Image (cartoon, rainbow, N blue to C red):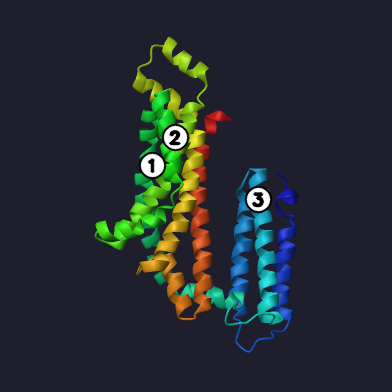
Amino acid sequence: MSPKVRFLRFTHIIFLLFVGIEFFLPNQITREPLSGYAIGFASLIEIITLIICAVSKDRQKVDMAADLGTFLFIILIGWQLMTAKFNLVKPILFPPVGIIVNQFIEDLPQIGVNILSSLSIIVEGYILGLLAIPVGLFLATSKRVGNISGHVAGFLGAIPPIVYIPYGIALLPTFRSVSVLVIFLATFWPVFMGTISGVKNVDSRLLNSAKVLNLSRFSTMIHVILPASLSQIFVGANLGLCISFILLTSAEMIGARAGLGFYVKNYSDLGDYTRTLVGIVVIGVVVVISTWIVGSIQNRMLKWKS
């Protein structure tokens, strides 16, 4: 790619527009908007965008980085205009970008602890939920059992896992173990149904080829059925991950003493909406990064299909 394609982007014009607004448009709120933090945050986005445009050899990734940067700068400009510059919304509910960034930096150690608390529960419950893959493979190899299992999974998977919390509290020793149970159930059924669906849709020619080669049932399952089913399995895995974050955040807002959901609920109860917004943004970033990791694993494992 030529330097023109890499660096001549509308993103950089929007960035300069944001900086110009911060410097030359007067503030209309009495509270100091901490514009330096807002400009610093925008500059960080600009630097990351420039690095990706300079390093990446994939035109699609360069375009995506530039488009994402443009979108973020437009959001920042709109937010600043409504808050610090024109005071169109209540500052206590919607503080300027600089105040939010400053609060994030001040609370970074506390936020890090809460992220680790939430992710440890997600990872533990999610890994347990992936046991649905071998269970689904084993059951789906029998067409009759697979059909019955699919109907049972459809019924049980339709029940929101959060309704099991009262029984979990009664039977399990800690709220953390209850949360792991909820994440396990949120992951297990989508992955199980994805596995069942994937096995059902395996090309019969692949199975016939395995028979011609005299592969054992186990070898056929591992080397033929599992790879052919991965697309549907990952559909269930991605769905399970998204549901897991939703349920965990809800559970943490109900009865936890740590985690991102607790962070948001605790400060919203105290009327600290700056920290509430920080928590909401952090949750969004954590979910996006987590789904990106799973998506990257999916692309690597399914690379052979392309």
Residue that mark 1 sits on: 130
Can residue 84 be seen in the rendering of this structure? Answer: yes
Cα separation between marks 1 and 3: 31 Å
Cα separation between marks 2 and 1: 17 Å
Cα separation between marks 3 and 2: 38 Å
Which label sits in the foreground, 2 or 1?
2
Name the disc covering residue 66, or none: none
Quadrant for the N terminus in the image: top right
Residue that mark 3 sits on: 64
Mark 3 closeness class: few <14, some 14–19, many ≥20 residues within 10 Å: some
Residue 276 x/y as whole percent: 50, 73
* Kind of residue at badge 1: Leu
At a point 75% along the width and 51% down the height, the residue shown is 4
Residue placed most toward the observer, 39 or 219? 219
Q: Is residue 248 above or below residue 217?
A: below
At a point 27% along the width and 60% down the height, the residue shown is 170
Mark before the other along the chain sequence, 1 or 3: 3
Mark 1 closeness class: few <14, some 14–19, many ≥20 residues within 10 Å: many
Cβ atoms under marks 1 and 3 closer than 8 Å: no
* Kind of residue at badge 2: Gly
Residue 213 x/y as whole percent: 42, 11
Which label sits in the foreground, 1 or 3?
1
User: In the structure shown, which secondary structural element does the residue marked by tag 3 occupy?
Assistant: helix
* Kind of residue at badge 3: Met
User: In the structure shown, which secondary structural element does the residue marked by tag 2 occupy?
Assistant: helix
Residue that mark 2 sits on: 150
Q: Is residue 156 left or right of residue 22?
A: left
Can residue 301 be seen in the rendering of this structure? Answer: no
Cβ atoms under marks 3 and 2 closer than 8 Å: no
